Image: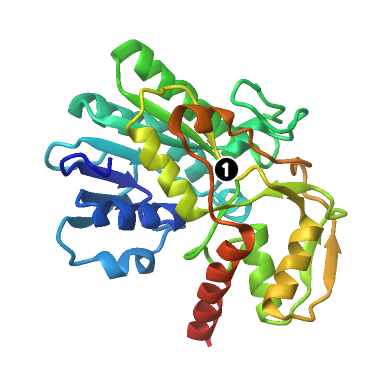
Amino acid sequence: MKKDKPKKILITGGAGFIGSHLCEYFLAHGHQITVLDNFITGSKENVRHLIGKKGFKLVKGDVSKPFSISGKLDIILHMASPASPLDYMRYPIQTLDAGSAGTKNVLELAKKNRAVFLLASTSEVYGDPLESPQTESYWGNVNSIGTRSVYDEAKRYAEAVTMAYHRTYGVNTKIIRIFNTYGQRMGINDGRVIPNFITQALLGKPLTVYGDGKQTRSYCHVSDLVEGISRILGSNLHEPVNLGNPNEMTVIELSKVILEMTGSKSRLDYRPLPADDPKVRCPDISKAKKELGWQPCVGLKEGLEQTIVYFRSALKKRR
């Protein structure tokens, strides 16, 4: 991707957290970027610094409804979907639509353009896993009618229809399963654990810990994820690949790191564990290491330092 001639790339959900970083990355490498976003969870502010730059175009639209993109496309990155529990529980129907009708619409566009298609799937397809770390061959433990199912099942369907288009029509598809990713441009009210903890610590509020805090997560900085996406686009892989950081830690351990780095004296506020909240979440990245030569290189404290700086600035702007 870095050495190829310039490509025309469509990024659905490109005004979201991860999408905006992809825009920045590929634009910096000389590619032409069109973003399609309906802004229900993404924000124009995330890409405002790119508006007006040569090769960048922002289009307001919904992938789950008919839309048109002019010109030939070489690559489509399908990132569109609410991604935090707060968001997909607030927008359950839109989340299901983005994963079903939205994915099919974008696959049709990829088929028509003979474009490379990348689906941003999620570690949530593994549900509350009964094995850890999770390998791509694990089928998962998912409650198909639970409150989180609107996201889990939307992504599981999206994976299924993506593979069907590859097998039936020969579309050059890629599937990544994204594990807990964090960094600059996450929303202050995102609801996921890192933005929650940082915001609460900076404001001197209690840090909300669900359950006993012994559930585990592993945290990948967004810059590492973007590098992994770039590599998979140039690969011959079609089946799912885990992208995440395998350094697993408990929520309590994370809270201590963030309190130390922010200098906050906030206490911990324990709340009941939400239904179907995973007890463990850790990727097996053997496939990405072997096939892509990829592994995360940003340490947690390094990534958190950048993220905390961003959140300090964002909170000041709100005052």
Relative image position of residue 277 (x, y in whole percent): 75, 44
Disc 1 secondary structure class: loop
Residue 90 appears anywhere in the view:
yes
Give the residue type that dot 1 points to: Gly
Q: Quadrant of residue 87?
A: bottom right
Q: Residue furthest bottom?
A: 319
Residue occupied by mark 1: 244
How crowded is the residue under tag 1: few (<14 C-alpha within 10 Å), some, or many (20+)? many
Q: Is residue 186 above or below residue 284?
A: below
Relative image position of residue 28 (x, y in whole percent): 26, 57
- Image-based side of 232 in relation to 131, left or right: left
- Image-based side of 75 in relation to 39, left or right: left
Relative image position of residue 200 (x, y in whole percent): 69, 74
Relative image position of residue 245 (x, y in whole percent): 60, 45
Q: How is the structure coloured here?
A: rainbow
Residue at x 46%, y 27% (from the top left corner): 291
Q: Quadrant of residue 170?
A: top left
Residue at x 59%, y 25% (from the top left corner): 136
Location of the N terminus by quadrant is: top left
